[in-house]
Each structure stands twice: as structure tokens, then as C-alpha cells.
Amino acid sequence: MPMQSSDLSRILADGRHSRRDFLGRAAAAGISVSALNLMMAHSAYAANPVRGGILRIGLAGGTATDSLDPALASASVPNNIGRTWGEELVELTVSGELRPKLATEWSSSKDAKVWTFKIRKGVQFHNGKEMTPDDVVATMERHSGADTKSGALGIMRGVASVKRDGDNVVFILKDPNADLPYLLNDFHLLIQPNGGKDNPTAAIGTGPYKLGSYEPGVRYVGTRFANYWAANVRGFAEQVEFIVLNDTTARMAALQSGRVHMINRVDPKVVDMIKNVPGVSIQTASGRAHYVMIMQCNGAPFNNPDLRLAMKYATDRKEMVEKILRGYGSVGNDTPINSAYPLFSELPQRQFDPDKAAFHFKKSGYKDAVILRTSEVAFPGAVDAAQLLQASAAKAGIKVEVKREPGDGYWNEVWNKQPFCMSYWEGRPVQDQMFSTAYISGADWNESKFINPAFDKMVIAARGELNPTKRKQLYQDMSLMVSNEGGTIVPMFNDTIAAIGPKVKGWVKNPNMEMMGYMAASECWLEG
């Protein structure tokens, strides 16, 4: 009987064979080089996976208005679902490195202004069509067009053109960017047939699961795609089912009863209780995730810089970390960048200072109550955090009125629209992507409406700066500018906290985004 790829996976996983021995066995088995590289990259967690069963996931962060268009994905549920049916050109490892996905290799010109990606052959879409470089080009065009509403627009604006060159796709940039491959891991940039131009909400991609029945804000079901190109490392369950459970108590109950096998967004205040549930384990990861309170700078009342500073000084970050995160996170400093980023520089920590808050509030001339909108779906403990701000601001003579909004519709009707609201970010692998997505002028997700031409110029300069010392200084300057002048209060960086049942295997600590970088449904399996 010829050796199968599953046999090779076990050989690689047990660690008793040399790389040369493994390569020889792989060649004898007729395993392609690309498949071999993928197997070796995933060997740390893909040992002896069990196929079959229905993997059920309970998720917070979904509403009835969620779209299946990856360009519009902005919350946990569509992001988790998207990475079961769709894939990007590259993927990010748990150690923060890039490895091939739908692109097998890439290279750049010496000035990092022209990037060439070789597109994987033999990959099939769920509709039976083979993926081609033309589909990649069309995808990038759709996310960078003049009328796009894509969350990736901030990073795509640096691309002058994308074209096909045989089996390759060539990106020609407006300015040099040494981080372009990292940007193409953005979860909006799922490759679709003809780029999704024909039907962006069809959820047809190259991923391990083909989306079947679904009801936005309620339930989604995906079935294993029989012709998936990387079936040896993803797509072990026969089906994946996502159940939207925005209520914390409901998610916990579903996990305890076995209705679901894993849940996201475990509230830190219930972690100890969940730890006592037989067979259930807590999975945490520290990284770039952070909670935010967003003041929009382009309109009243927060177009007043003194009012923004008043609210920043009125925020007791240490109290929030202690009472909201309960040890599962760290103090923020009104910038989205922390020590998890490769070119991080420490800034002077802004402290809770009622006197400075009162000074800037009086200087602003604003006399009314500040209205802060929040919801349980914003992040675990968001309502409690809003009330803490209300109490700390009162010590500076600032009245904060907390308006609790319903979870359904929060991301469409409140976030990115109301002058002051709460939200969360899971961060990005590099500074350029974080700043380009949420802070550069014109980015669709510039939620604080921070418009600063000097900042934009620094972002572009840092992209093309190949000297790491100079680049680090630029990023420090940008963080300082955002912290002092921006409209975003970053009180805390949060650990991601999930919980899994006793049957779940293959879980890996991943600091990139929640639920194993949104890959838990695709890369975990069930035993027992």
C-alpha cells in the first residue's frame, strides 16, 4: 500500500525522523513540494487529526445586519465565518511570520515598490471553477475601487495598480512599502471568483468549508469542501456550525451543556467559574487586541482638541484593567501600538488626572453632558467600562451620560457613525497596517475621523523607510501624535479569552486575533 499524506504527518509530528528522511519518504509518496511545505509548516498542531462530526461554535459579535461580503466584515461572527469559506494570498503564523497560502512565493524590487506574487495552481473555488491570477487581480480591484466600502481600503490606497503576468500577480505601489505581504493577510481580502464583482455576498471561495444554510445574526452552517486543496491541514470536521450567542450567560450555558464545543469572548469576571466546569478549558492569548472609546474629531463636540484631552485625562486606565480585565490584559496609552509590535517604542504613560481633565474641559468651553454609547457586543464588560468612565470623569466635574444600545444593529447604526462610542480592535501584524486601516485620512475604518495630513505623510514615509532605526522613530512619532491629538481613547490591551469543551483538539495559542486568528473552526477537530 502506498504511503499517504496522513502517514507522513504522523512521521513528521513524532519528531524522531530527520528532515532528509522525511523528504525522501515524501518524494516516494509523490507528495508535491507545495503540499509538503504546507504539511511541515502545520506539523506542530496537525498531528493525528480526527475527521468527521459537526463542530459547533458559539460566538458573540453577530447581528441580523451582518453581510457575507468580506469587504464589509467588521465584527467577530463574519470574520470567523469568512475564514472558513475564503482565503487570502498569505497567512500569518503564531510567531508573526508569513507563509504561503494562495500565493506560493513572493518577491519585491529593491525599492519595495513592485511586488510579485506567484499564484498557486490547481486550487478550486466552491463553484467548481479553478482559481486564476485574474481572480486575484479582480479581488484587489474591488477592494480598492473608487466606490468601494471595503475595510481594506486604507491599505489598498497605497496600490497604484495590480496586473497579471502569466502565473503571477504584480502589485505596483504608489510608494515603497516593505510590509505589503503582511497587508495582504487582511481578512477582507478573501479571493473570490472574479473578485466578487458578480456577487460579493455569495460566500464562494477556496476555503475548507462551503457555506450552506444561514440566517444572519442567528446561525451559519458550512460543509466540508470535497475538493479543498489543503485538506491535510484544515477542514477536519464534516460540518461547522456557528451559532450567534451575544449574551455572555447564554454562551456559557451552551458550552456547559455541550450544545457548542467552543465559545469566544469569555468575560474575565466568569473565567474562574468556567475553569471549574469539568472538561472545559480556558484558552488565552496576549497580543495586539485592545478596547477603545472613540471620539469623532470631524464634528461637534469632539472637533475640540481640549475636550478630547479632557476625556483622556478623565479615564482611569488602571482601574479599568483591574475591574474589567481582571489580570487578562494591560494598561493602554491612547495609541493602538503596544510591545507586541516589532518596532515598538515606549511613550510616557498618560495617567488618570482629574485636575488636568477639569482644566482641559473648562478650556474647551463645553458645558453639556458627554454622551457615550455602548453595548454588550462592543466588548466583554463594555457597559461596566462605560460606567467606570462615568464615575472617574465625575471626579473632574465632567458629566458623562451612558446610553446602552441594543446589540443588534450596533455595528451598523452606532459604530463609525455616532460621535462617542465603544469598540474593539484585534490589532494587525505590523504598525503600517494598523495605522493605514484605522487612522490614515480617508480610510473607511477611520472611526475617530482623525484627519491629519502630517500624519499621513509619516505613514507613507515609514512604509518606504528600510532603515529600521529611522522607521522605528517614525512609528514612535506617529503613536505620540495619535495619543496626543487623536480621538481614540485606548484604556487597555486585552487578552483574547476563549473556552473549549473536552472533545476539541488541535487548539493552538495564537496572539494574532481571537479564535486562533479566526482559524479555530478550520483547524480544530473533535475526538471522543
Image: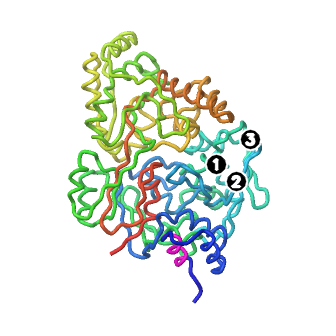
208 horizontally vs 310: left or right: right
Most foreground residue, 453 or 281? 281
12 horizontally vs 194: left or right: left
Query: Which amino acid type is shown beneath numbered disc 1?
Result: Pro
Q: Which mark is residue 71?
A: none
Count numbered badges in the picture: 3
Residue drawn at (62%, 65%) of the image: 37
Q: Which mark is residue 181?
A: 1
Q: Quadrant of residue 525?
A: bottom left
**Marks 2 & 1, CB-CB < 8 Å contact:** yes
Q: Which mark is residue 113?
A: 3
Majority secondary structure of the magenta segment? helix
Residue 288, position in %: x, y? Answer: 45, 41
Neighbourhood count class around disc 2 (C-alpha, 10 Å): few under 14, some 14–19, many 20 upward: some
The C terminus, quarter of image:
bottom left
Q: Quadrant of residue 196?
A: bottom right
Q: Which residues are magenta?
A: 6-13
As displayed, is residue 376 above or below residue 320? below
Residue 189, position in %: x, y? Answer: 59, 52
Query: Which amino acid type is shown beneath numbered disc 3?
Result: Lys
Most foreground residue, 168 or 275? 275
**Marks 3 & 2, CB-CB < 8 Å contact:** no
Query: Which amino acid type is shown beneath numbered disc 2?
Result: Trp
The answer to whether residue 162 is visible is: no
Determine whether the residue tagged by mark 1 lies in a helix, strand or loop.
helix
Q: Quadrant of residue 122?
A: bottom right
Most foreground residue, 238 or 526? 526
